[in-house]
Image: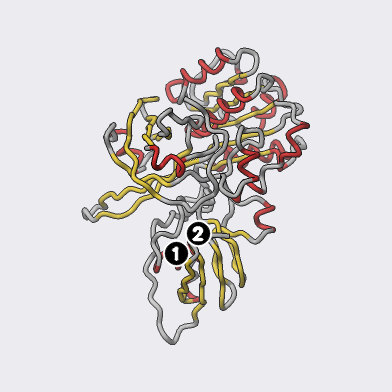
Amino acid sequence: MTVPTTAKARRRASFHELEVSEVRRLTDDAIEVTFAVPAALAGWYDYLPGQYVALRVHMPDEHGVLRELRRSYSLCAVPVQFPDGSSELKIAVKRDIGGEFSTWANAELAAGAVMEVMSPQGAFISHSTPGAVSASQGTGAVSNVLNSMNHPEELGRRTGKYVAIAAGSGITPVMALAKSLLGGSPAARLDLIYANKAAMDVMFLEELADLKDRHPGRFAVHHVLSREQRIAPLLSGRLDAEKLEALLGKAVHAEDVDEWFLCGPFELVQLCRDVLAARGVARSDIRFELFTTGRPDRPAGQHGRPVLIDSSEETTKITFTLDGLTADVRSPVHARETVLNAALRIRPDVPFACAGGVCGTCRAKLVSGNVTMDENYALEPEELDAGYVLTCQSHPTTPEVAVDYDG
C-alpha cells in the first residue's frame, strides 16, 4: 500500500455506488464499515484525514413508502491506494437511540451490500497533514474550504504538539488524524482526551493501544469514563469545565500546542472551545467537528419540501449555479424557505448532507442579494468574509438572491 500525498479538490459532491467489503464489530453498539473503491473511481474518493462522506439510502416509512435519508460519517483511516489503483474508505457507525439508519446498519449491514457514497468533504483537517499544503495550492485538490485554513508559511514555526478531545463516536476522524500526524513526523506528539460512559463503549480500543505501542512517549490517551469508577479520580465522572481544566493542567502537555482537535456533541465542543478561549488559545488553532447541533427542534430536511405559490403572493427570485448550469426558482416570502430547499424543488442533485448547518456540504458563494443564516457551525470567519453561506440555513432577505455552488 502507498499513502497518496494529495487529495482531490473540493469537487462537486457526487454520489457513486460502492460495495461494502467488510463490516467489523467495534463495540456492542458500533461497527466499522469498509467500502471498496475501484480504480476507475479512486480519483473521486481521495481525501485528507479528518474528512467525511455522506451515505444516501432509501428506507421505508411507517406506511412502507420509500424515502431518502442522508447520513454523514467521518473517515477513520488514513488514505491508502493499492497497486492496482483501487482504494478503500473506512467509516464507523454507532447506533443512536431512535436512529433509523444506524440501528439498521448495526443489525443488518454486511459485506456485499452496495450503497451510494458521496465524494469526501469537510475541513476538519490539520495544517500539518501530508498533502494539505499541496492540496490548498492546486486547482484539483481538496476543497476551496481548505484554502482559507491552510497557511504553509506557518509550518516552519510548528512544535509538532497536538491535543485532541473527543467523546463517543467523535473518535472516528481523530483516529485518522492521529495516525497521519504521528506517522508523518518522528517529532510529533499527540495527547488525546477521550470521554465515554464506560469501558465497553470505547471505540477503537485496540487500535488506540496499538498506536501507543508504535509511538511510545509520543502518544498519550486519557480515558475519561462518566459512569465507571477509575483508579484516578481525575479520569472518572462527567467531563465538565472543572475536570477539563484539571486535565489540561496536570495530565496533558497543553503548552505550545500547534493545533487542538475537538469532536463530539455540541455541548462538549462548545465547552472545550470556551475553556480553551479562557486559556488564551487562538481561535485559528482550534479545529472542531460537531456530530449534533443540540437542536432537536430543527430536524434536518432530506429533500425539498413542497411549497405552493399563489400568483398574488409576494415572492423572492432565487438564482443558483451548479456545474455551470444556472436556474431560477420562485419562493413565497411568507414560507421563509431556505435557499437549499428552493433549489432542491427543481434540481434534486444540489449538494447537501446534514441540512443542519454542521457539515458545510451545501456551501455556496453569495453572488448578489442578501440572506440571513439561522446557524453556522461549518464556515470559518474567512469564508464568511469572502461571501460564502450555508444554503441549508440561508433565508433570502432581498427580492432577488443569487448563489454559486461552483464558486
Residue 213: x and y in percent read 55, 12
Residue 157: quadrant of the picture = top right
Tell me which residue sits at (54%, 51%) in the image.
Answer: 360
- Residue 48 can be seen, yes or no: yes
Residue 303: x and y in percent read 39, 59
Q: Nearer the viewer, residue 259 or 11?
A: 11
Q: Which of marks 1 and 2 is nearer the N terminus?
A: 1
Judge from the rendering whether residue 75 lies leftward or rightward of residue 69; answer left or right.
right
Residue 341: assigned label: 1
Q: In which quarter of the image is the C terminus?
A: bottom right
Tell me which residue sits at (42%, 47%) in the image.
Answer: 118
Contact between labelled residues 2 and 1, with CB atoms less than 8 Å apart: yes
Residue 37: quadrant of the picture = top left
Judge from the rendering whether residue 133 lies leftward or rightward of residue 60; answer left or right.
right
Label 2 amino acid? Cys
Residue 214: x and y in percent read 56, 14
Judge from the rendering whether residue 379 lies leftward or rightward of residue 228; answer left or right.
right
Label 1 amino acid? Asn
Residue, disc 2: 392
Element carrying mark 2: loop
Residue 238 vs 53, above or below: the answer is above
Mark 1: few, some, or many residues within 10 Å (few <14, many ≥20)? many
Q: Nearer the viewer, residue 41 or 128?
A: 41
The alpha-carbon separation of the residues under discs 1 and 2 comes to: 7 Å
Element carrying mark 1: helix
Q: Count of labels shown? A: 2
Tell me which residue sits at (46%, 83%) in the image.
Answer: 313
